[in-house]
Image (cartoon, rainbow, N blue to C red):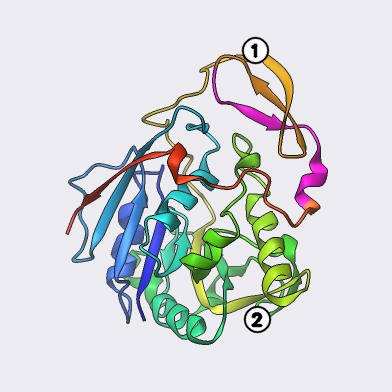
Amino acid sequence: MELDVVVPTLRTGTVQRLLRSLSLSTSRPDIVTLVSNEVSLDIETFGLDVQVARFRSATVPIGHGDLALRRNIGIWASAGRNIVVLDDDLVAAAELVAVSRELLRTLRYFWGHHRYLSFADHPVEELVALPPDRGRPREQPPNSWHLWMSCYGGMFGAPADLVRDLGGFDLVFSCRQANEDQQLGKRIARHVDGTDRVFVYEPPFAWHPTEPEPWGPPAFSNVCPSDHETVDGTVGRVPVQRCKRCPWLRITDETCLFDDSVHWPYNPAEIEVQIVELR
């Protein structure tokens, strides 16, 4: 089964650690897509097939808070295969890719699990092989049913076409970087299973640092560097504040989180994407 790993990448200092862990997996991904204007094109790929997606837009906000956009870009770049989305500061457990493939042979999608652990005293080679009970669980307990608020896009797998058909991560949360994971989780659960619950699987799982590194500055941004000149507007049916000078916006009605429709679906025509292969 073909499987692509999508990594929205802003932390250039940690993504090499994630790539190293994926290279040590019992089953390697077919390709890793780093969605990043920041990462260097001469990074070490550890023998993985890696591509970097550079991106620009005049209408969709780019800069701090654009995680949903980066995830969507990587999903649309996956050529219709199955995808697993990982965050750039994680370390993949040895069985993550293999178990993800097995789950997607029978499931329409899955939400995986994180274990928190200090990385200070553990090299990547050791982290990859550690059992999950060495870390603190994100969800209590893993391998059980939770409400959709437990969905976290940093460990998520699905056929790319399913996410595309549902409009991707809702960009109405752009510039906020919160709740787009949970809202997609609710939409998928209702669409596929007719429920508001999700099962959080372990395995697969990834290690999450207890001392996360902050995001660095974006290499490209199309939003105002300081105060915005705001006006009231809407995106779909959602009230927002917009900036008159740049694409920045912010929702002013939290009820859109509880809706199971997408308010600002990803539109690849709005994004200029350049794919650079690092094989």
Observer-nearest residue: 208 or 97? 97
Whether residue 63 appears in magenta in the rendering, the answer is no
The residue that label 1 is drawn on is 229
- Marks 2 and 1 close (CB-CB < 8 Å): no
For residue 148, above or below residue 134: above
Q: CA distance from mark 2 to mark 1?
A: 47 Å
Observer-nearest residue: 256 or 112? 256
Whether residue 249 appears in magenta in the rendering, the answer is yes
Q: Residue 183, percent across and down?
A: 69, 55
Residue type marked 2: Asn
Residue 112's mark?
none
SS class of the residue under badge 1? loop
The residue at the far front in this view is 269
Relative to residue 100, is residue 150 drawn left or right?
A: right
Write down the region rendered in magenta: 246-257
SS class of the residue under badge 2? loop
Q: Residue 231, percent across and down?
A: 71, 17
Observer-nearest residue: 274 or 225? 274
Relative to residue 26, is residue 253 drawn left or right?
A: right
Q: Residue at x 52, y 59 (%)?
A: 164
Residue 121 seen in render: no
The residue that label 2 is drawn on is 143
Q: Residue 193, percent across and down?
A: 71, 77
For residue 65, above or below residue 47: above
Residue type marked 1: Glu
Q: Residue 237, percent across and down?
A: 77, 39
Q: Residue at x 76, y 74 (%)?
A: 194
